[in-house]
Image: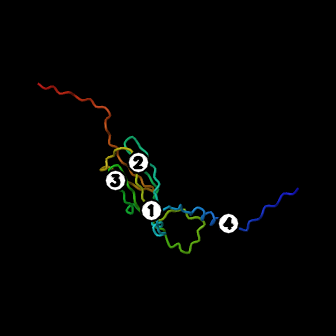
Amino acid sequence: MTKPKPKKSKTTIKESLEKQEDKNKKKPKLIGQKFSLKELNQQQGKLPVDVFQTEKDIVIQSTVAGVMPDELDITIENDILTIKGNRERPGNDKDINYFYQECYWGRFSRQIILPMEVNPARVKATMEKGILTIRLPKIQRKKKRKIVIEKRE
């Protein structure tokens, strides 16, 4: 008994990549909601962040390559820190035939609920090599304090 020979595919690598991209681009249908393509294209990207603590600070780090410090808007209100910005696409890409297009271009924002109370007056933000670092000093509260009773006569 002979094994059947596998069929040779005449699909090019580019066509295979395009098919995969088409599968990845399918958007979930929102039942009962009306929206336009323009509204979908104006959605903001979500900024990935790392949030950790040191002994004295809450630290937030994020990669914001391609964005200048003056193009970022960082605010703190109550226990929420907000980072907003816009990453402009370099050049004109109308004639570009992409194999992959994974970089996010356009507006982005992120709100982070702070895990503890911080001193908003002492928050510091720096950017080095495309990495934004925000240091939020913790408000140090003593857990136990001796209360002295005053004598009244």
Callout 4 secondary element: helix
Q: Which mark is residue 88?
A: none
Q: Earlier in the sequence, mark 1 or mark 3?
A: 1
Identify the residue position indicated by label 2 in the image.
59
Q: CA distance from mark 2 to mark 1?
A: 24 Å
Few, some or many residues within 10 Å of mark 4 (<14, 14–19, 20+): few
Q: Measured from the top left, where is residue 9 in percent x and y?
A: 74, 65
- The reply to whether discs 1 and 3 touch (Cβ–Cβ < 8 Å) is no
Location of residue 113 in the rendering, given as x and y in whole percent from the top left corner: 39, 49
Q: Which residue is mark 3?
A: 76
Question: Residue 90 versus residue 118: which sits nearer the camera?
Answer: 118
Q: Which mark is residue 13?
A: 4
Discs 4, 3 touching: Cβ within 8 Å? no
Q: Gap in Å between the C-alphas at discs 1 and 3?
A: 19 Å
Mark 4 or 1, nearer chain start = 4
Residue farthest toward the bottom in the current orientation of the protein: 95
**Mark in front: 1 vs 3:** 1
Q: Earlier in the sequence, mark 2 or mark 1?
A: 1
Q: Secondary structure at mark 2?
A: strand
Marks 4/3: CA–CA distance:
48 Å
Who comes first in sequence, dot 4 or dot 3?
4
- Specify the quadrant that holds the C terminus: top left
Disc on res. 44 = 1
